[in-house]
Amino acid sequence: MKLLIRAAILIVILNLAVKADSTITKKTFKPKKTTIMQDLGYDLKYFAIDWGAFFAAPFSSSKNLIISSAVVGGTVLSSTLDKDVRKQFSVPGLSQYSGTFLDGPTFYGYVQYPSILGGALYTIGLLARESELRKTGRMLIQSLVYSGTVTMALRYATGRHRPFSSSGNQYEFSWFNSAGDTQSFPSGHTVVAFATSTILAEQIDTWWARGILYSFAALTGYARLHYDKHWFSDILFGAALGFGSSMFVIHRERDRENEIKQKLKKGGGFSFTPTMNGVNFTYGF
């Protein structure tokens, strides 16, 4: 019951922010009205298309390849600091629910809660015919699924030992292992926190939303370090993966909207194009 109440409060706050903030109002794209089934078809189609594009994105351009290489290189370099950072900030043997302010950021990193929020936003937006709310819910689910598949694959492939289960060496790996103590890389909580915060912050599109949401995501990463559940490099890569996944989803959506708008501006004949709520058939003079 408490979980449902929290989800409802978050939904109301986000909905009010979307309606109140002028920057989001300017972005709102209101095409021809469609049915619920048409909206579902649109969302499922681009969910699948974007998923495939997500895995190809690191190699799709020289710019993306440079960014991806920088993230990997930065992760490797940061791993040399893992033992020193652990000595400074981690508390071995401490329960991750210690009744401190870090309990909130820890809960924030569990994938169940943002998944419920994303599903609630999508369902309410779909039934209430609120395209921005529906789109936000879909993009949140997209980011969680895309980043989640990469997280699980890397955890299984690397089998990196968590700090508390290692001998103090940050380079202990049990390749292709699914045991809980060998699921350190990357930090799943941090991936979820940054994926969630990025979608919500960029959709609300205000300085205070970014300040609050990104700070809370950073606290989630710190909590995992403090409770000795992850190495510093696990958290750094998790933050990059969560943020990058959400920005990919956001840019894909905005590129589609801009492409549609440009086609409609050209005019000169009939135009048959997909929209945020289905399909538009227009004639330009």
Image (cartoon, rainbow, N blue to C red):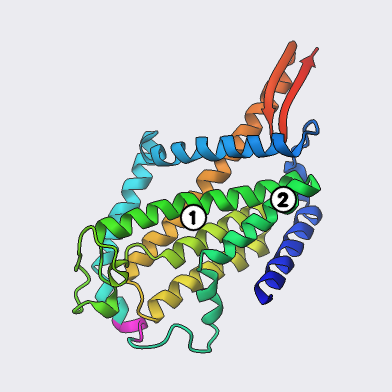
Could you tell me which residue is drawn at 65 percent across and 34 percent down? 257
Could you tell me which residue is drawn at 74 percent across and 15 percent down? 267
Q: Is residue 23 visible?
A: no
Badge 2 amino acid: Leu
Range drawn in magenta: 87-91
Number of residues whose C-alpha sits closer than 10 Å to that of mark 2, classed few (under 14), some (14–19) or many (20 or more): many
Whether residue 88 is in magenta: the answer is: yes
Quadrant occupied by the C terminus: top right
Instruction: Please give the residue where the numbered disc 2 appears in the rendered image.
Output: 133
Instruction: Please give the residue where the numbered disc 1 appears in the rendered image.
Output: 243
Left/right placement of residue 259 relative to residue 66 reads right
Whether residue 270 is in magenta: the answer is: no
Spatial CA span between label 2 and label 1: 20 Å
Number of residues whose C-alpha sits closer than 10 Å to that of mark 1, classed few (under 14), some (14–19) or many (20 or more): many
Query: Is 53 or 79 nearer to us in this picture?
Result: 53
Give the number of the mark in front: 2 or 1: 2
Q: Is residue 156 visible?
A: yes
Give the mark nearest the N terminus, 2 or 1. 2
Task: Report the disc number at residue 144.
Answer: none
Q: Position of residue 204 (x, y in %)?
A: 69, 55
Quadrant occupied by the N terminus: bottom right
Q: Position of residue 182 (x, y in %)?
A: 27, 68
Left/right placement of residue 197 relative to residue 174 reads right
